[in-house]
Each structure stands twice: as C-alpha cells, then as structure tokens.
Amino acid sequence: MSGPRFRIAPSPTGFFHVGGARTALYNWALARRLGGTFVLRIEDTDEARNRPEWTQGIIDALAWIGISSDDPAFEGPYFQSANAALHVAAAHRLFEAGHAYYCDLSPEEIQARAKASGKPGYDGYSRARGLAAGPGRVLRFKVPEGTTVVHDAVRGDVVFANDTIEDFVLLRGNGTPIFMLANVVDDIEMHISHVLRAEEHLPNTPKQQMLWEALGEAPPVWAHVPVVVNEQRKKLSKRRDKVALEGYRDEGYLPEAMVNYLMTLGWAPKGDAEIVPWSQIERDFRIEDVTHSPAFFDIKKLTAFNGEYIRALSVEAFIAACQPFVEAATVPWPQERFDPAVFAAIAPLVQTRVGTLAEVPRMVDFLFLPDPEIDPQAHAKALGSAGAREVLAATVAAYAAVETWDADSLKATLEEIGAANGMKLGKAQAPIRVAITGRSVGPPLFEALELLGRDETLRRLRAIEATSG
Ligand code: GLU
C-alpha cells in the first residue's frame, strides 16, 4: 500500500448533500495530487434510516462531479455493516485491556444519579464494579484523565478537557456496536491516514482519538472543514435549503461549474481568478489553506459560475448539454413541434444569456409553441405605453413588405419606425417582443424573428393588435 489514504464515510440516509460533495472533492483533490487513495465507505449501520437506493445515489453523485469509481485512486465502496464482527472484536479487545467496562444502569438510574450529584451525564458509576458482559449491559469506554489535544490541519490544536467527556458507550445492551466505535475501527482497518470531514464531527474527535490510541494506533491527520451555511448564516439543512447535489444537476448546473464552486466553499485558488480548471485545483489545493469561518453557499454566485462555464462551451457542446432540457417530458411545447435545426440556430444566442440549462426552454418556447401565452403584465406595460400601438401597426405594414427577411433588415426597419414615433429601438421593440414571445425578456429579438419566419411573425403581430389594453 502506498501513498496517503483519504476517505469519505457517508450514511445512505438521503440525497447526497452539497456539503458532502465539497468534502468529497477536498479528499479527492488531495488523494489525486499526493498519489494516494480515496476510499468510499458507506456507513450503513443505521438500519432504520438506510435505503439501498441512496447508496447508488451517492455513487452516481460522485461520478457526476468527476469522482469516478473507475479511477485508480478510487477504492470501494465498502459497507460498514459488513464489518460488524470486527467492531465487536475491537470492543472486546478494549474490555480485555482494561479500557472499557460493562454497566447495567438504566437511563432512569443514570439520570437520577446525575440529578443527585448536579453533574449532567453518566458519572462512571460502574467503572470499578467489575461487571462481566451480560444481557442488557452496555460496554462503556473508560475515558482517561487529563486532556486530549486534537491536532487539526485546518484549525490547529484543539484542546478538550477529558472530564467534560463521559464514559461513552461502545456496545449497546444487545451487543451491537455504536457508530463511534464502528467509524474508528473501520478507519483503522482501512489504513486511513487522513480524516478530512465536516466541522460538525469535531466534537466526536477527542473520543475517536482516544479509541485510536486505546487500540494501539497513532491517530490520523484530522482536518475539519468549515460548516456550509445559507443566507441567514444557518447551517444548510435538508428541510430549509436546496441541498441535494442531484437537484442542481437536474436544474442544469454543469458538473465542472459545480465542482469549481464547491471547492471555493472554504478555499480559494491562488491569484485573482476564482474560475479555474480542475487541473489547477488539484495542483494547488492544500488543507492548510482551508479557512475556519463558515462558508456561505451562495446560489447566485454558483449560478454566475455556471453561466461562465456555459459560455465557455462550444456551441455544439452547449446544444448537447441542452438535450435533456429541451426534449424532456416537461417542456411546454408539443414534442412534435420541436425542430432541432431551429434550436441549433437560436442556441448561440441563448447560450450568452442563461445561468442554468433549465432556463433554456423558457427562452425558446415561443419558437415551438403554436400560441405562446401572453403575460398580462408584460402586455399592459408594452402595449399600454404612448405610441406602442402606432409602432405595432407600422411594423405590421412594414414587415409585410420588407424585401429580405433577415435580422439586419428587420432591425433597421424597426429602428426607422421607432425614430418616426420618437422612440429608441429598445422601447420600440417592447410590443413586438411581447407579441412574439409573450414575455418582456428573451433572446435577441431580430434573430428570433428571422427564425420564426414572416408568416408566423405577422400572424402574432396581428393577433396582439386585435387585443385591447
Ligand atoms: N457517517 C458519518 C456521516 O455521514 C461520517 C462520519 C465521518 O466522516 O467520520 O456524517
């Protein structure tokens, strides 16, 4: 075995979280740069909450952000549940070596003792009672005196007073191991050298470090990366925030943009540019450069990143990336009206204007809908202003007669009409755009008209002429 060994240890209890994806990418960048290994361990011991499809979801989500199980740096997935016998054996070793003891107190008895003494938590009552294993007896770790110093590569030395840590449970009354033990035994078993994970696990770390030491092992390099928060500076939560990586994929965020953005949650590439290719990230990412402060998951910024990545695609690649969005069952137009050639023609104009691929159908729907719905507010604004109706009438007449139906002629024509009515082009365009697209914003108008064709343009202009308001 060569090189450092990193891991992520997600529990398959829900969608893969963007914070988890950030942690995975940090581990991946280091494993790749240092010629090490990235281990995927599925912590599936919480039977009540696990579902096998979430495991596949994790693997797919990782693959989407470039962490592929085909890469030689990737190892796993391993399943924690397969190691239960090892976890129990380690607990027994700890008992034999005097690092753990059995206890038969009920939760009520523990509470009563805590109340009587005024000190919360378990007081170590059974430490010296010499109980043997037995049904209903939990195995507890004997927390040593003194302090535990966690050397954290992000946060520096974090000192914990051991008298604030109760003798924690290793095996439940039914003999099954608890998470803390399983997590450490697996890390030892898998020769993990670096535990880089979310800050919320820092409070567990002194206990885990004690277990590493009691099991005769030198602890790994610890690195706790900052919590990811929302606009209100609250930790991103499943209930409140959009946290599923999948959700971003389905909205048309490009994986490269997502990866680049996630890396900046707690770290910044060298130099001025934040938008940098993975090759540079992999070369430059260092644990020591990760910040302590909470990282704000800013969807606006992510979308701006995504827009940049979308614009950097070749037109062909953009069209290909749009396929699942324009041919999906959710598009507003009848499937048979979609014309790939028309879409290919408008695509370069759309590419410059969207932040996500999910915005694309709304930008082009007017080309494939028989009669786009007219937004009443856009209608009132564009057609209610002084001179709008005159411009519309003059445009219908002029467009019926214009010699060449192309964007330049259509633009020049409308410019003239606007000038004759004392309007700049932007203002003169408004009623035309609403008539054609139903909305006040969309792709560049004259190119859109060129694609739509003379007959359909005139039909829509006349239809809106006939409306009141
Ligand atoms: N299974 C734990 C979780 O999903 C991970 C613990 C760890 O990374 O050590 O939160």
Image (cartoon, grey):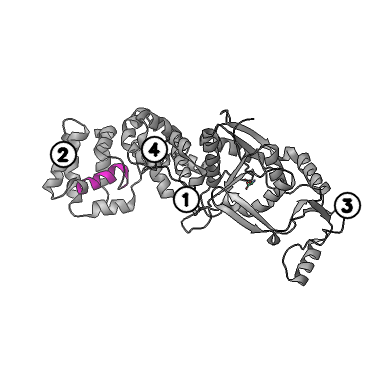
Neighbourhood count class around disc 3 (C-alpha, 10 Å): few under 14, some 14–19, many 20 upward: few
Q: Secondary structure at mark 1?
A: loop
Does 132 lie within the magenta span?
no
Cα–Cα gap, marks 2 and 1? 47 Å
Residue 8 in percent (x, y) is at 60, 41
Magenta segment, principal secondary structure?
Answer: helix
Q: CA distance from mark 4 to mark 1?
A: 18 Å
The tag on residue 297 is 1
Tag in front: 3 or 1: 3
Whether residue 438 is in magenta: the answer is: yes
Mark 2 or 4, closer to the camera:
4
Q: Is residue 431 above or below residue 163?
A: above
Question: Can the viewer see residue 458?
Answer: no
- Report if the CB atoms under discs 4 and 1 are less than 8 Å apart: no
The mark that comes first in sequence, 2 or 3, is 3
Q: Quadrant of residue 163?
A: bottom right
Q: Which residue is mark 4?
A: 309
Residue located beneath label 2 in the image:
413
The mark nearer the N terminus, 2 or 4, is 4
Could you tell me the amino acid type at mark 4? Tyr
Secondary element at image label 2:
helix
Q: Residue furthest left?
A: 420
Which is nearer the eye, 393 or 49?
Answer: 49
Mark 1 CB lies closer than 8 A to ligand 1: no
| Badge number at residue 132 | 3
Q: Rounded to the nearest whole Å, what is the CA distance between mark 3 and mark 1?
A: 51 Å
Query: Which tag is nearer the camera, tag 3 or tag 4?
Result: 3
- The segment highlighted magenta reads 427-439
Q: Amino acid at mark 3?
A: Ala
Q: Residues within 10 Å of mark 4 (few under 14, many from 20)?
A: many
